[in-house]
Image (spheres, rainbow, N blue to C red):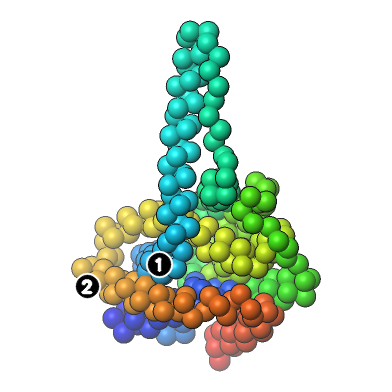
């Protein structure tokens, strides 16, 4: 992989990550079309997602910071309740336990954790399959078409509601996590699947978009930990490592500007238009492989 290829893919990642059209699918299709090969599993794609993760932190820093603070507070309360339990068992006292989940941001943090559980399980168990799917000449294009179908069905179903974090159930969070886990395959849009799931669960459009973005953070960090060992693989050279980092930086810079431009667009544009784009992109990817 050349630096120019990495820059091109970084730009593609920075733009498509914040649209329900599957950035991973676009990356895989472009790599196949250009005859690019890299034997370090999906490390490069994960690094590109880490780049756009910085843009997410910039756009939703207030919410992310509060969620992080509340997560830390929840952990401390759980530890405190464990100490109270042990003390009560030892002394026969009946001290009351602290409430773990309360308020908007603690509930937001709790449902994010619940969503991450099925995502992590699906991502871990399908890791080898995803690696093979990423280099398939046909699967990314076909999966982009599937993404388009999901978007179109959701749009014409006229679903959505007014749910905010305090109204989200743990069942809702679990289903969104499952949809995010399925989207590990190239072409199945993570953002598209989770926003559709959110709308089907009755989320407001604005909250479904925010939830979809924020729930990706632990998934991307988890994927990075799974793939970071590839830097020590025999196929990884110093030059290739710097090329990967260059692509990540380009994805981050592109994503920073893209998210500020696209966020207002996402809140107003009907999903059917993204579905039509997926049909065009998926068809082009499939035709390109047969041409």
Q: Would residue 14 be found to the left or right of residue 176 on screen?
A: left
Image location (x, y in percent) of residue 21:
57, 76
**Is residue 107 depicted above or below 282 in this figure?**
above
How many neighbours does mark 1 have within 10 angstroms: few (below 14), some (14-19), or many (20 or more)? Answer: some
Residue 121 visible, this angle: no
Q: Which residue is most to the right? A: 157
**Is residue 23 depicted above or below 193 in this figure?**
below
Marks 1 and 2 in Cβ contact (< 8 Å): no
Relative depth, front residue between 16 and 162: 162
**Is residue 6 depicted above or below 74 in this figure?**
below
Q: State the separation of the CA atoms marked 1 and 2.
A: 29 Å
Which structural element holds mark 2?
Answer: helix
Give the residue at x 27% y 65%: 236
**Which is in the foreground here, disc 1 or disc 2?**
1
Relative depth, front residue between 167 and 44: 167
How many neighbours does mark 2 have within 10 angstroms: few (below 14), some (14-19), or many (20 or more)? Answer: few
Residue under circle 1?
Answer: 58
Residue 64: quadrant of the picture: bottom left
Mark 1 or mark 2, which has the lower sequence index? 1
Q: Which mark is residue 239?
A: 2
Image location (x, y in percent) of residue 264:
55, 78
Residue 54 visible, this angle: yes
Image location (x, y in percent) of residue 27:
46, 76
For the C terminus, the image quarter is: bottom right
Q: Would residue 40 be found to the left or right of residue 132 on screen?
A: left
Image location (x, y in percent) of residue 3:
28, 81
Give the residue at x 38% y 53%: 225
């Amino acid at each position: 992989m050349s630096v120019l290829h990495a820059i091109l893919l970084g730009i593609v990642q920075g733009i498509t990550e914040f649209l329900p059209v599957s950035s991973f699918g676009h990356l895989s299709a472009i790599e196949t079309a250009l005859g690019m090969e890299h034997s370090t599993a999906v490390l490069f794609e994960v690094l590109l997602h880490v780049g756009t993760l910085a843009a997410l932190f910039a756009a939703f820093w207030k919410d992310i910071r509060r969620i992080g603070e509340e997560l830390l507070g929840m952990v401390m309360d759980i530890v405190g309740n464990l100490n109270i339990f042990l003390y009560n068992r030892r002394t026969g006292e009946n001290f009351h336990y602290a409430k773990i989940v309360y308020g908007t941001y603690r509930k937001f943090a709790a449902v994010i954790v619940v969503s991450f559980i099925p995502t992590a399980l699906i991502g871990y168990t399908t890791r080898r399959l995803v690696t093979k799917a990423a280099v398939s000449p046909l699967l990314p294009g076909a999966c982009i078409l599937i993404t388009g179908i999901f978007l179109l069905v959701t749009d014409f179903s006229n679903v959505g509601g007014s749910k905010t974090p305090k109204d989200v159930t743990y069942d809702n969070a679990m289903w969104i996590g499952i949809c995010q886990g399925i989207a590990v395959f190239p072409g199945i849009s993570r953002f598209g699947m989770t926003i559709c799931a959110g709308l089907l669960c009755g989320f407001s459009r604005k909250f479904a978009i925010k939830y979809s973005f924020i729930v990706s953070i632990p998934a991307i960090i988890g994927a990075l930990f799974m793939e970071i060992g590839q830097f020590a693989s025999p196929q990884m050279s110093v030059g290739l490592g710097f090329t990967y980092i260059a692509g990540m930086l380009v994805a981050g810079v592109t994503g920073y500007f893209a998210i500020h431009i696209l966020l207002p667009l996402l809140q107003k544009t009907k999903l059917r238009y993204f579905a039509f784009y997926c049909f065009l992109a998926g068809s082009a990817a499939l035709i390109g492989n047969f041409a």
